[in-house]
Amino acid sequence: MQNDRNQPVGDRPNWKPETLAVAAGRPDRVPDAPLNQPIVPASTYVGGSTTDLVGYGRYGNPGWTALEDTVAALEGGSRALAFASGMAAVAAVLAAVPADATIVIPEHCYLGVAGLADEYRQRHGLTVRTVDIADTAAVLQAADGADLVWIETPANPTMDVADLPAIAAALAEGCLLLVDNTFATPLLQQPLTQGADMVLHSATKFLSGHSDALCGILVFAADTDADLVARAESARKLHGATPGVLECYLVLRGIRTLPVRVRQAEASAKVLVGLLEDHPLVTRVRYPGFGSMLAIDLPDAATADALIDNLRLWVHATSLGGVESTLERRRRWPSELASVPQGLVRMSVGIEHVDDLAADLLGGLDRVRA
């Protein structure tokens, strides 16, 4: 399936996502072929007379192709582009839209997205509108005359959920819809099948799953404007936002276990949500009803920091989506949006035994409350 980059979506095997995660992006099955796509550490390729050669290490790599084909298959897309990081993918999208474009972004979104959008507003004349993505009417009002609507669902870090089908169906022709699917993963949500034009992943997170690789991925729907795809690919080439060959290998290896990791982590998250809702120190539990990302509101920053200091199993870390359970108070970052509560603790549930996770978390809350 590695050579199916230009294969129409409908021509792919009608496999379930769990099967695609394991079977897609493999080398051709010929005798003595490697089962996994090997790492090709090449910066330079031998030239030839045809025009479809890779040419140079900044333009392509077999490892990129294997990863891109796999994520495109999982998302039901026609083409994917891998980048050096999630933020590199974000930058490629902003570079691909017109300088005077109007975009709509969530009022609560990843702080890097908000920061880069503001930079483009100040330096390049981009018009940026912010909106509560859980309020469909407000999204559509903000989208009037816009060129791009950018949705995170669930949103980072407040876990707001957007009505993707309703938003996609009501957007005016010519207005692009991008969905950041990092939190849900294609195992739980496929925005391209609901009308989105593009899907973005910080592949550093759940797709990789082991907290050891920086990577970003853009996936395009079959009917996405070819010029937009070309501009995004050009941004990758010209800005040098190319993924490392080792990183692509690690992310692809992580995807092989994505279904079992997502299933285990989601089951544990649902158990923890029920326990946290009953704890007197927790003022609010933010959980979208699916996935393994949640957040809790504690009375203030001091309480949240004290909880983190009282945990032994949960890891205090800013990233997420790994096999280990992590958490952090998001407002510890000076650049975090001011609308995020000081006592909000974002939590990424890993694959440890849920009894151990619950004992550590509830014990920490009890010690802080005592």
Image (cartoon, helix red, strand yellow):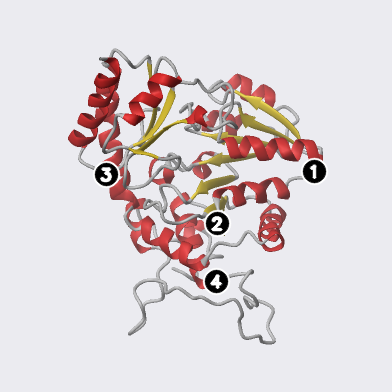
Q: Answer whether labels 4 and 1 touch (C-beta < 8 Å).
A: no
- Residue at 59% from the left image edge and 76% from the top image edge: 43
Q: Foreground: 114 or 7?
A: 114
Q: Which corner quadrant of the image does residue 338 belong to?
A: top right
Q: Amino acid at mark 1?
A: Ala
Kindly identify which residue carries mark 1: 99
Mark 4 or 1, nearer chain start: 4
Q: CA distance from mark 2 to mark 4?
A: 18 Å
Query: Of label 2 and label 1, which has the lower sequence position?
Result: 2
Q: Which mark is residue 61?
A: 4
- The residue singled out by tag 2 in the image is 78
Q: Position of residue 95 (x, y in %)?
A: 72, 49
Comparing labels 1 and 3, the label whose residue is closer to the camera: 3
Q: Nearer the viewer, mark 2 or mark 1?
A: 1
N-terminal of the pair, mark 2 or mark 4, is 4
Q: Is residue 313 left or right of residue 205?
A: left
